[in-house]
Image: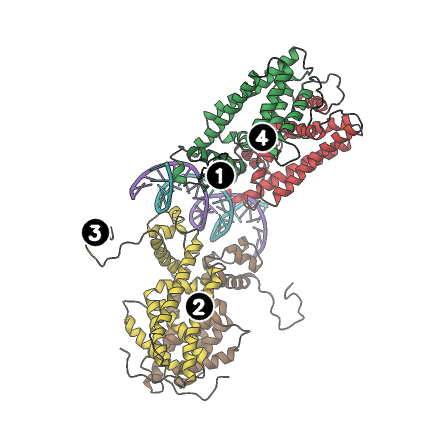
Chain colours: A yellow, B brown, C red, D green, E purple, F cyan
Amino acid sequence: MAGAAGSDPTARPAPVGEAAILQAAIAVMAEHGYHGTSVRDIAERAGLSAGALYHHFASKQEVLATIMERGIKALLSRTRTALDGAGDDPVARLRALVEVQILFHLQDQRGTLLGTSELRALEEPVRTRHLAKRAQQQRLFDAVVADGVERGVFATPLASEASRAIVVMCTGVAAWFSPSGRLSGRQLVARYQRLALAMVGGPAPEDDTG
Amino acid sequence: MAGAAGSDPTARPAPVGEAAILQAAIAVMAEHGYHGTSVRDIAERAGLSAGALYHHFASKQEVLATIMERGIKALLSRTRTALDGAGDDPVARLRALVEVQILFHLQDQRGTLLGTSELRALEEPVRTRHLAKRAQQQRLFDAVVADGVERGVFATPLASEASRAIVVMCTGVAAWFSPSGRLSGRQLVARYQRLALAMVGGPAPEDDTG
Amino acid sequence: MAGAAGSDPTARPAPVGEAAILQAAIAVMAEHGYHGTSVRDIAERAGLSAGALYHHFASKQEVLATIMERGIKALLSRTRTALDGAGDDPVARLRALVEVQILFHLQDQRGTLLGTSELRALEEPVRTRHLAKRAQQQRLFDAVVADGVERGVFATPLASEASRAIVVMCTGVAAWFSPSGRLSGRQLVARYQRLALAMVGGPAPEDDTG
Amino acid sequence: MAGAAGSDPTARPAPVGEAAILQAAIAVMAEHGYHGTSVRDIAERAGLSAGALYHHFASKQEVLATIMERGIKALLSRTRTALDGAGDDPVARLRALVEVQILFHLQDQRGTLLGTSELRALEEPVRTRHLAKRAQQQRLFDAVVADGVERGVFATPLASEASRAIVVMCTGVAAWFSPSGRLSGRQLVARYQRLALAMVGGPAPEDDTG
DNA sequence: TATGAATGAGGCTTCATTCAT
DNA sequence: CATGAATGAAGCCTCATTCAT
């Protein structure tokens, strides 16, 4: 069994209980969607019976809500942390934003897919709360871009469109990126940083495209 | 009844039969997804009984397949037509691509949402065919960008990333655009054209942001 | 099959649809109670699948509500009709009340059992409505007894207790009466009429105990 | 905590273990019926977990059986004790029967409701044993009434109907009596004694209706 | 074509019961 | 004794699909 012996200190134990269910649900729901996934699908993948799932969550909907809430909270938190460590320069701040956005969505590709496609399956009031957090996240980008424009570092007349497009394109990587593909995650970050700077009319970087 | 009298020559008659079903299905499935939508939901919205739907389509899956196939074919066709009329200049060609991409997704916002989120619900072999068409569509963008780079009109070292990001961001408008919002469709086109040019390192345009 | 041939003109056709379901539900629920009866139990007894039941009723609860509402309405209606035909004499009126009460509960023993034991399973607001009708029914008895007392025909100082006890004892016959038992329904009516008159201190009748 | 300190010598300690479970089960089952009550409902109300309940009873059915058996035994025993203390006079004996019957059902209204409505949920062979005890109880009334008739103290020609009706009406008080209502238990006893005597054609009492 | 009843599978959830801790 | 996680059966209900009318 996975994680049975103590031989490999780096091996994570197979998740149990709540964690196993959430992980299974992310995997299955990302593939088939909320309505296309049955509680049995989730439970089977998590290694327990359908009924047992209800010892950890009150409903299938609560499973989705938990996934969505944790996901957006983690993204917001990591984004804020990145900004805190990025200093004052708008270029550095935008690059930090793109980096964390790309890395986050790559590490949690399936969660991201869920987050974008299953918003409609989220019931109120969780849905409204979730949308508010997404708007917060967008505003973090808006503020950096606006600040750069104000200080003359970014030259675009399309601050808000650029800001939204950057978020959209960074989120979009989750839909097509493959870890076994042509580019590594780090390379992708570098390229999208450059792309983002181009979109806001920032200074052209030295060659950093890996 | 809607569209009964011929008084208003611009009023489209209420669609019937197949057309009514497809229109209803797009509306309902865009909101709740394929698996979140029942045949009854579609039929009710189309104004007939669930059983009657089966006189027009063999299955719910066939309804989805029809929507998806028609959608991607129309997009490809309109894209090709736009390119045919755009002349030889890479800038004009890219602008034409962005224009048709944006306008198409705005005119059929719900169909676009379906196309991106319900690919997973499409069964083989339709799914593979659909993916091939999407790749064709992407390659039309890739070719224009690559051509521009080759001819020195576009300066980006990230041709393929930019090309994909342009498609992603244009498709993305369907998810947030509101006809009653700040920008008209035409203004949006102008701004996304400029944004796209910035992404590929094209020549900065005169001010055209509306 | 029941009702297949036209040979017996008195044979009622096997009920179908709604009627079959209600009849089946009364039978099964009277035996096992609302919560002890599954939708499948009802459907099987009615000769259809569990799913088909939902073409006729929105829920199991609606089946119960229909049974209960029809039952109490029929009882009230028959009671009022009986009073209308009973003339002015309190003795005749009380006898009419007892007669209809007994006959009704004998003809629909299982429905009566449901009505008394499954009130608790009835959800609001149907439950409150049902209780109001039951109170109306009781008041019809109360009025006859009070009138008899006022006019000196009944001698009891316990009008309201007697009135309630009469209703309780008449309703109670549904719980123990057997058509194959010692007494016929008509005999039972005669005896309970005499008993009721005794309870209100009415005039002793000639011998009418069958 | 309830009953924690010994300060109030009249306060009963909160029941624990078996007693708590039985008390909880009576309360919950009287309201929702056997099948409408889950083991969890009982356990929660008794203040323990569902699993713990199985340290005290082998099954939900055993809980019901225990309640029903203890109830009918107590009623029979108290009835016999009352008869033993009532002397030889049929009037006194019938009054004693009614008194104990009413008081018992008032003290244990919910248990009585269970006893009448959940007989059907009782499995064999407990059910048959229970019915036998109920018949015994009825026969105690039958015997007193028959004796009174034989000795010319009661004048009714409907001995067995009256006897059954008396039991039914006395049991029925559990369904409607409210301690906060118009009548006290003692008053109710007096009135039902008078009513019972009227039913058997016994001698009219002095006024004792409280 | 259209309907509405029917079906059998499957959906989410609850249940009585067991058992390791 | 008590807990809480687990299970397999079952409960209510919805679904996609079929078919007689």
- Residue under label 2: A134
Q: Confirm whether circles 2 and 3 share one chain.
A: yes
In this image, A188 relative to F16: left or right?
Answer: left
Disc 1 residue type (three-letter)? Thr
**Mark 4–mark 1 distance (CA, rounded to whole Å):** 23 Å
> Is disc 2 on the same chain as disc 1?
no
- Looking at marks 2 and 3 on the same chain, the residue that comes earlier in the sequence is marked by 3
Q: Distance between the residues labelled 1 and 2?
A: 44 Å
How many residues crowd around disc 2 within 10 Å: few (fewer than 14), some, or many (20 or more)?
some
Name, please, the residue furthest toward the bottom: B206
Q: Label 1 to label 3, Cα distance in Å?
A: 45 Å
Amino acid on which the number 2 mark rests in the picture: Arg
On the image, the x and y values in percent for residue C109 come to 61, 30
* Badge 3 amino acid: Ala
For residue A5, which numbered disc appears in the image? 3
Residue D37 marker: 1
